[in-house]
Amino acid sequence: MSPLSLPVLAGAAIVTAPTMWRALVEGTASVEVALSRYLVSVLLCWAALGLVAMLVGPPPRPEVAEAEDQQVPEAAPLS
């Protein structure tokens, strides 16, 4: 998973939303603090989502039936 993927950036934005609000709207926190927390959150979300992706693994692929071994049933005629 890329650190610039949508799930990582959105997760970090959700985590740091209160700090961003305080910095950009209320003015009680500095913008530098908000951006540094966002960057740290991006790294943490990237690691967490990468770990989950590693534990879950890729989706299973359907097995391809070989033409010689298995017969594909024909569809029933429509009445």
Image: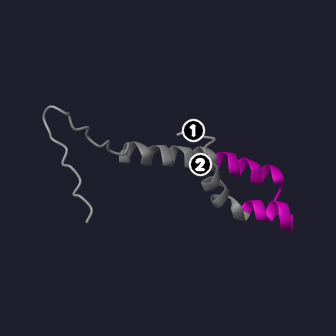
Q: Residue flagged by tag 2: what amino acid is it?
A: Val
Compute the Cα span from label 1 to label 2.
8 Å
Three-letter amino acid code of the residue under disc 1? Ser
Q: Where residue 72 sits: x, y (%)?
A: 19, 44
Camera-nearest residue between 70 and 63: 70
The numbered mark at residue 2 is 1
Front residue (pair 11, 64): 64
- Which corner quadrant of the image does residue 71 belong to? top left
Range of the magenta residues? 19-40
**Which residue is label 2 attached to?**
8
Q: Is residue 60 left or right of residue 30?
A: left
Give the x, y percent position of residue 51.
Answer: 44, 45
| Residue positioned most to the bottom | 26
Q: Dot 2: few (<14), some (14–19), or many (≥20) neighbours within 10 Å?
A: many
Are circles 1 and 2 on residues that touch, CB within 8 Å? Answer: yes
Residue 79, compared with residue 63, is above or below; it is below
Q: Position of residue 61 (x, y in %)?
A: 32, 42
Residue at the top extreme, as displayed:
68
- SS type, badge 2: helix
Question: Which residue corresponds to the image point at 57% horizontal and 47% vertical from the top-left?
Answer: 44
Q: Residue at x 68, y 45 (%)?
A: 39
Residue 24 colored in magenta in the image: yes
Q: Quadrant of the C terminus?
A: bottom left
